[in-house]
Image (cartoon, helix red, strand yellow):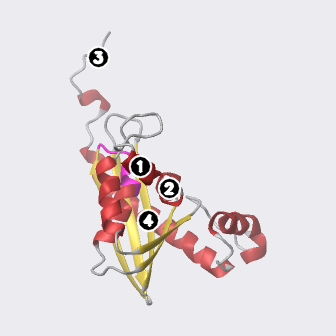
Amino acid sequence: MKTVNIYTDGACAGNQEKDNIGGWGCVLEYAGREKELSGGEINTTNNRMELTALIEALSALKERGLRLRIFSDSSYLVNCFRSKWYVSWQKNGWKNSKKQPVENRELWEKLLALLEGNSAEFYLVKGHQKLKEGGESTNSIAYRRFTDNNGAGFSYEDFERVVEYNIHCDALANVFINEHRGELPDADDGNEVPWD
C-alpha cells in the first residue's frame, strides 16, 4: 500500500469580521516527490479553509487504496476524524450534540467521500510552532507534546519535518490572503452613514 503524507493548513484574516479573506495550503509527499497547492476565498472562515486544504489535497490524488497520513494544526479537523464525530452527525441527520445543523456540512460530506477507499490517519500539529536552535534537547517539551498527541512512532527528525511542513503550509495559505487584501471594501466604503 502506498503511503502519502499530506500536510495542510488554513488561515483567515479578519475571521470575525463581515469582510475577510481566507487562504489554504497543502503539500502532498510520496516517495521523495512533492506537490504543493494553495488558494483561498473571500468572506469565509478559518474552519472552512482548514477543511478546504484537505479537500484540495485529496482531490489531487488519482488513486484509491492509499495509506494517508494527514498532518494538520486544526483540532476541528483532526478531532472530528479521531473521535468520529461525523458518525454521530450522520446518524442524527447532520445535527450536532446540541441538535443544531452541523456547520460546513457540505465540506464534511465532500471530505468523507474523498477519504472513502483509503486508510487515513490524522495527526495534530501545534500551529505556528517555531523550533529553537539546539536540536532535540532544546525542543524536548515540544517533541514530547507532539508524541503524546500522536503516538511514540515519530523520531525527533520526523517531528522537525512535520513542523517545517506546517510552517510552509501556513505560508502557502497566506499567499492568497496577501494577494487579495486590496479586494476587501474599506471600512469607509460601506453604505452606512458616518453618524448615529
Q: Residue furthest right?
A: 137
- Choose the circle earlier in sequence order: 2 or 1: 1
> Residue 126: percent from the left, percent from the top?
59, 60
In percent of the image, x 69 and y 74: which residue is there? 152
Please report contact status of discs 2 and 1: CB closer than 8 Å, yes or no.
yes
**In whole angstroms, how far apart are the C-alphas of marks 3 and 1?**
33 Å
Residue 194's label in the rendered image is: 3
Identity, as a three-letter code, of the amino acid under mark 3: Pro
CA neighbours of label 4 inside 10 A, class few (<14), some (14 to 19), many (20+): many
Front one among 26 and 119: 119
Please report contact status of discs 1 and 4: CB closer than 8 Å, yes or no.
no
For the N terminus, give its image quadrant: bottom left
Q: Residue furthest top?
A: 196
Magenta stretch in the rendered image: 43-50
Residue 74's label in the rendered image is: 2
- Choose the circle earlier in sequence order: 3 or 1: 1
Q: How many numbered dots are placed on residues in this image?
A: 4
Front one among 115 and 144: 115
Residue 39 visible from this viewpoint: no
Q: Which residue is mark 4?
A: 8
The answer to which quarter of the image holds residue 184 is: top left
Please report contact status of discs 2 and 4: CB closer than 8 Å, yes or no.
yes
In percent of the image, x 65 and y 63: which residue is there? 149
- Choose the circle earlier in sequence order: 2 or 4: 4
> Residue 130: percent from the left, percent from the top?
62, 64
Q: Which residue is mark 1?
A: 47
**In whole angstroms, how far apart are the C-alphas of marks 1 and 4?**
12 Å
Front one among 97 and 106: 97
